[in-house]
Image (cartoon, rainbow, N blue to C red):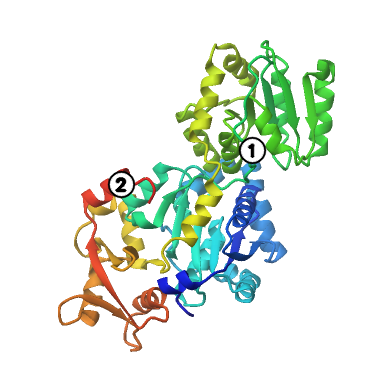
Amino acid sequence: MRRTSERDLEARSVERVLILSAGVGSGHNSAAAAVQQACAARDDIAEVRVLDVLQESTSLYRDLLGKGYFVLVEGAPWLVEWGYDVSDQPFWRRGPIDPWTRANAFPTLSEIKRFAPTAIVCTHFLPAQLVASLLLRGLIDAKTAVVTTDYDFQGLWLTSAFHCFFVAREEGRVQLTALGLPSDRVRATGIPIAATGLPAPARDRARPPMLLISAGAAGGDYAVAVVRQTLQIRSPFTATVVCGRNEEVRRRVEELVAPAGDRYRVLGFTEEMPQLLRDADLFVGKPGGLSASECMAVGLPMVLVNPIPGQEVRNGDYLMEQGAAVRCNTPATIGWKIDQVLREPGRLRRMQDAAQRIGRPEAAADVLNGLLDGPSRPLVITRAAQKSILAASEQRLIASDLTGPSALVRLIDPVSDSTVALLQAEEVVDLQKRYADPDGNLVLRHETRASFRWEARRLLRSVLGDDQALPVRVEALTSGSVALRAVGDGSA
């Protein structure tokens, strides 16, 4: 592996960007496509490739992770919620990738080797975990980014090595810095969505409000109940119903709205969704991370129905907290709830303003720029540090509350002023015994002695690359540093 130095970055004129996703639902791949689109705006990118890691794996693995998830959503939503809560603990699983996942990753590993990327963007936690293991083993020389695709941060996304971590909103960034992650490695950019290049829509207040009712790309049959309820709305409105790829749902909706004349327009899967979002006044559907981000980017408030337990429920909580959404908890009240929004003077306008305020249409470009223009050395979080982060989370503490040998300590590259490692205090003591210079400064060097612990060798291999030595500054976490950085630096 060759570690790119800061001087190399200045001299290099082209980048090769690999975007790794996983087709569990459409959101992760949509985010990947948005980042791919943003690559076209940079003249230093020579080639970009998008890879769905599930499509590269066996059909059994793909079906269990992809289709199996939605089977649980439909048949045992309580189990999905339980699984989300369990995996929400940061670094709940700290060991290597399981053998089955590693075996299914061989085609992806081959493609990474063939493509030889200088930058890797992960829009799903599976490839993010794979890429982290490659960094720690010294098998790739690329800047790496983890890009979350829901408004609420979930601990499952945390990995042991990366260059930049991108979350959807400021609260997620504050949460990660409170856990101990350095503020120079975490950015709140929003969720990447496709750019339209169009100005913010100017809605015609004189015409009846237009509802955009979405059944999702797969065409969930809950849309039929939603449409049936809208027939009871007394306020003036028109509606466009998008049924996705489910022709049976489309047929049932068309039969249902036939007596209403031209008030309803019914579509199947359509490429017109960006324009439909701009034309609509109120969206009715599920609060997936990408769908919600696309709505917010054009100032389109939402009526939330049938959210998936876990991430979609939490997405909805955020949107309602910001005043950009209302939620229907039972199909029987959907029509009444929409009518309340339409009938109350000024309410729809206020919700549209709230949606516009939190929209992040430039998120994809911000992710790409943050990665390519960011630190060249990765951040490594040792397994001992991961254990401390998990323990603090379980005890409802922040990282700076930890004391003694399990307290967290950062190693900082003084040249770039970026954090390159997060360790336990007792690990730093071991490093200082081996690598302190005569003046007591810590200078990391490659270790060849077999007696040295494997965890430390992974750290040195990842951080040093081909460099023979790296002076680092040791910095302990303090309550002030964590809190002030989290609150005071929104761009970090």
Residue 387 vertical placement versus 443 (above, below): above
Q: Residue furthest bottom?
A: 449
Q: Amino acid at mark 2?
A: Arg
User: Which residue is found at the position 42% from the left and 78% from the top?
Assistant: 465
Task: State the CA–CA distance, disc 2 to disc 1.
Answer: 45 Å
The residue that disc 1 covers is 198
Along the line of sight, which residue is nearer the eye, 173 or 91? 173
* Neighbourhood count class around disc 2 (C-alpha, 10 Å): few under 14, some 14–19, many 20 upward: few
Q: Secondary structure at mark 2?
A: loop
Q: Is residue 147 visible?
A: no
Quarter of the image holding residue 377? Answer: bottom left
The residue that disc 2 covers is 396
Mark number, residue 328: none
Left or right of 164 in this view: 325: right
Q: Secondary structure at mark 1?
A: loop
Residue 289, position as x, y percentages in the image: 56, 42
Along the line of sight, which residue is nearer the eye, 431 or 190? 190
Quarter of the image holding residue 424? Answer: bottom left
Residue 39, position as x, y percentages in the image: 60, 57
Residue 370, position as x, y percentages in the image: 47, 56
Nearer the observer: mark 2 or 1; the answer is 1
